[in-house]
Amino acid sequence: MSVQPFRPRFMKVGVLTAALQELTPREIRDADPDRAIEDWAAFAREVGADHVQLSAALHPDEADIPPEAMLDPVANTLDLRRPFDEQRARRVGAALEANRIGLSDLGYFDDMLHRDAEIRARKHDFMKRVMDAAALLGVDAVCGFVGRNQELSMEANLADFADSFVPLLEYARERGLTYRVEQCPMPGWTTGDNWHNNIAYTPGTWIALHRICEKHGVGDQFRIHYDPSHAILMGQDTRSIFQYLKDEGYGFLIGGFHVKGQVIDARGVAAWGHGGQTVERGDWRDGHPSDVPAEQINAWKKQTVLCEHELPGTARHDPLAYLQNRSVDWLDHQLAARELLELDVANTHLVVEHEFPPARIQDRERLAPILAASIAFTRRIDQAAACMYALQHEILPAQGIAAQGRGREAFRS
């Protein structure tokens, strides 16, 4: 028996810059692209973040999907229309240092397996530019999707992944980077009936994809940026996912976190089930997919009829919702991460992703207190989990004292 000191380990709390897409007016940032990052560094400090996940995207003039067709419009805070060179990197680094803000990683969320070869090539070229920028900025990861080739079955997409996506991972390896995949199934990405449009949507496919990566020597480049909102959308819970990964020997796969909740509407599930609205959505016209962007967004009713994104701290939860996997139990989420995953906790990023529709306000003054409160909530939930973990798993066991109760358990139904 020995006395262990109290040494809680906290995660690094940050925010994705897509939370406020137009912090810098478009006419200013288009002429001076790095001004957007400078302004965001100051805003991040104002709302209490320690780090930012820098959002990159094709410029609105270059994108193949118009903003009107997106459920959660992206932000090109990192503007890469012209090369990101050492001079630009020094300017960005100076702004971050002046505001005492770090970078978690760079995020570019797009379909890397797009069925159109020309569009796919354009997206891959942009992702490589994001990786080049990440290397110049000294971060160790980029974050994005895998996507899906809509012309192929899910099974056939595995071969497409090996042929087309693995070269991106090789490019990342050459620059000392990891590619962290967010697992959103992206059901509204297409007006078709496919619901899983990002093949890396669940632990079963993460493992299958990682095995492919290992065969090609890029296993260390493929990791998951876990977002619990997508698990809730698919009827899963965090603790069971983490336990499954541990049981299968893949507890190392998760390398970072998005902090975004999902609140399931039981009435919507009663009407449509977890597959969402399948007919009469408004994204088809006269028997054909609509070519009107404002109508294409109705494809997202596959998701929005049964749930709504939560900005952490904004939802009032019935405790029964946690048990039924209708909402994220944030405290258990942070406990389970420490108990079941192979994490370097003090160097793990916890990135607040703001996609709560009523509060997606493009007004700095109004949004600032909302983000500040959510970031503070996220930080304190992580701190509470860290303290509980230290007490229950380090201090008490060292003195031969058992923790009380059982807590939430995996695979309970």
Image: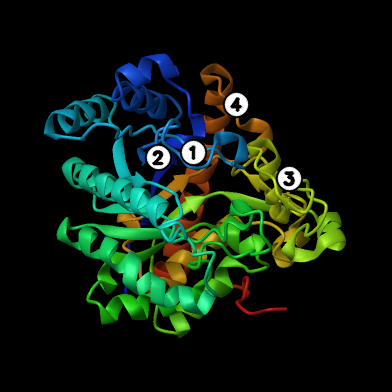
Inspect this view and state whether residue 338 appears: yes
Query: Quick one: label 3, few (<14), some, or many (20+) residues within 10 Å?
Result: few
Mark 2 vs mark 3: give the one in front.
2
x, y percent for residue 349: 37, 51
- In the image, is residue 142 above or below residue 136? below
Q: Secondary structure at mark 4?
A: loop
At label 4, the amino acid type is Ile
**Left or right: residue 303 compared with residue 341:** right
At label 1, the amino acid type is Val
**Left or right: residue 235 compared with residue 318:** left
Seen from this angle, which residue lies furthest bottom? 248
At label 3, the amino acid type is Arg
Q: CA distance from mark 4 to mark 2?
A: 20 Å
The quarter of the displayed image where residue 179 is located: bottom left
Q: Which colouring convention does the figure follow?
A: rainbow
Query: Quick one: label 1, few (<14), some, or many (20+) residues within 10 Å?
Result: many
Residue position marked by numbered label 2 in the rendering: 57
The quarter of the displayed image where residue 240 is located: bottom right
Residue position marked by numbered label 3 in the rendering: 316
Residue sitting at x 87%, y 59%:
271
**Left or right: residue 30 compared with residue 330:** left
Query: Quick one: label 4, few (<14), some, or many (20+) residues within 10 Å?
Result: some
At label 2, the amino acid type is Ala
* Callout 3–callout 1 Cβ contact below 8 Å: no
x, y percent for residue 301: 73, 51
Residue sitting at x 65%, y 42%:
291
Q: Secondary structure at mark 1?
A: loop
* Callout 2–callout 1 Cβ contact below 8 Å: yes
Residue position marked by numbered label 4 in the rendering: 361
Mark 2 or mark 1: whose residue is earlier in sequence: 2
Residue sitting at x 28%, y 79%:
214
